[in-house]
Image (cartoon, rainbow, N blue to C red):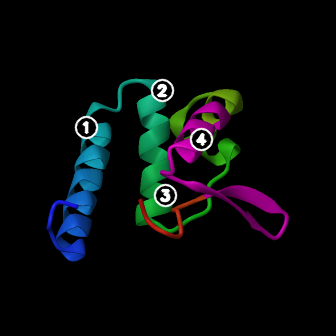
Amino acid sequence: MSGESPARLRRQTEHLFRSRIYALCMSGKTTRDQIWTVTLNRTHRGGELVTAADVAEHAGCSKRTARDTLHVMENNAFIERERRGSKVGFVKPSGGI
């Protein structure tokens, strides 16, 4: 361990995450970047559950492209899968990132 307090490490991690969101929002030129931006804004800032269809509509891409990108995001722990009633989608990870 680096000797830094857990609170400081958390602040640094949150800062890096916000910087990543900002960078994605500013570049937003590729479909993948748009999917990341839409998903992170809606799940992390808005606290929403998003589906591939929702993301595809907002990012202007196919459901398959949205679904593939969401799975990459899930595999890298940026989002997690959740079921709410009959709807299955993705949300901010319960343990944070």
Mark 3 Cα-neighbour bin, 10 Å: few <14, some 14–19, many ≥20: some
The correct choice, above or below, for 3 with respect to 7 in the image is above
Q: Distance of mark 4 from mark 2, alpha carbons?
A: 12 Å
- Specify the quadrant of the image occupied by residue 26: top left
At mark 2, the secondary structure is helix
State the residue position of label 2.
31
Quarter of the picture holding the N terminus: bottom left
- Where's residue 49, x and y in %? 62, 62
Of mark 4 and mark 3, the one earlier in the sequence is 3
Marks 3 and 2: CB-CB under 8 Å?
no
State the residue position of label 1.
26
Tell how many labels: 4
Mark 1 Cα-neighbour bin, 10 Å: few <14, some 14–19, many ≥20: few
Q: Distance of mark 3 from mark 2, alpha carbons?
A: 16 Å
- Specify the quadrant of the image occupied by residue 28: top left
Marks 4 and 1: CB-CB under 8 Å?
no
Under mark 2, the amino acid is Thr
Of mark 1 and mark 2, the one earlier in the sequence is 1
Marks 4 and 3: CB-CB under 8 Å?
no
Looking at the rendering, the stretch of residues picked out in magenta corresponds to: 67-90
Of mark 4 and mark 1, the one earlier in the sequence is 1
Mark 4 Cα-neighbour bin, 10 Å: few <14, some 14–19, many ≥20: many
Q: Is residue 41 left or right of residue 23?
A: right
Mark in the foreground, 4 or 3 = 4
Under mark 4, the amino acid is Leu
State the residue position of label 3.
42
Under mark 1, the amino acid is Met
At mark 3, the secondary structure is helix
- Where's residue 69, x and y in %? 57, 34
State the residue position of label 4.
70
